[in-house]
Amino acid sequence: MYSSGVRQSLSLSGSYGNVNDVENAKLIARKLFELYDKDKNGLIDQYEISPMLQDTYRYMSRVFNPSKLDIESYARILDRNGDGRVTLSDLETLCIRYLCGESPQAGK
């Protein structure tokens, strides 16, 4: 099951130091990407987004069974550059923005 892997892979309190740091935000994105890219094709496909959403809600002690519309909407949110694909770069951009409060260019 994904959720136990999320807790183990993203033990934020210990191994990542300051999550507000750009490099740590990228590391978190990479761990998330590796966890959910089950077929290892370099993309988070729509069928891989459903477990991601379910685990997020489960982490908040809620049950959520996403609809096709939920999955499509979240895929658009994850697809930061709008190319129709969810890549590691997209997740890095998202993590930098939300964990560090800056655009990826600012961290370079």
Image (spheres, grey):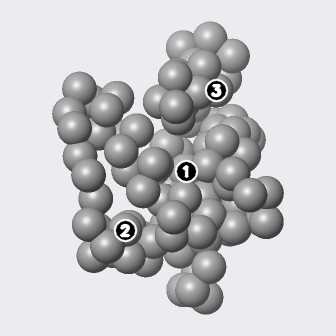
Amino acid marked by disc 1: Cys
Q: Where does the image place residue 37, in percent across and percent down from the top left?
A: 68, 54
Amino acid marked by disc 3: Ser
Mark closer to the observer (2, 1): 2
**Which residue was labeled with disc 3?**
9
**Res 96 seen here:** no
Q: Quadrant of residue 28?
A: top right
**Which residue was labeled with disc 1?**
95
Amino acid marked by disc 2: Ile
37 in relation to 43, above or below: above
106 in relation to 52, above or below: below
Q: Quadrant of residue 14?
A: top right
Looking at the image, tell me whether mark 2 or mark 3 is earlier in sequence order: 3
> SS class of the residue under badge 1?
helix
**Which residue was labeled with disc 2?**
71
78 in relation to 20, above or below: below
Looking at the image, tell me whether mark 3 or mark 1 is earlier in sequence order: 3
Mark 3 near mark 1, Cβ–Cβ under 8 Å?
A: no
* Pointer 3 local density, CA inside 10 Å: few below 14, some 14–19, many at least 20: some
Which residue is found at the position 53% from the left and 35% from the top? 2
Q: Nearer the viewer, residue 101 or 63?
A: 63
> SS class of the residue under badge 3?
helix
- Residue most extreme to the bottom: 83
Looking at the image, tell me whether mark 2 or mark 1 is earlier in sequence order: 2
Q: Nearer the viewer, residue 23 or 5?
A: 5
> SS class of the residue under badge 2?
helix
Q: Where does the image place residue 27, in percent across and percent down from the top left?
A: 72, 39
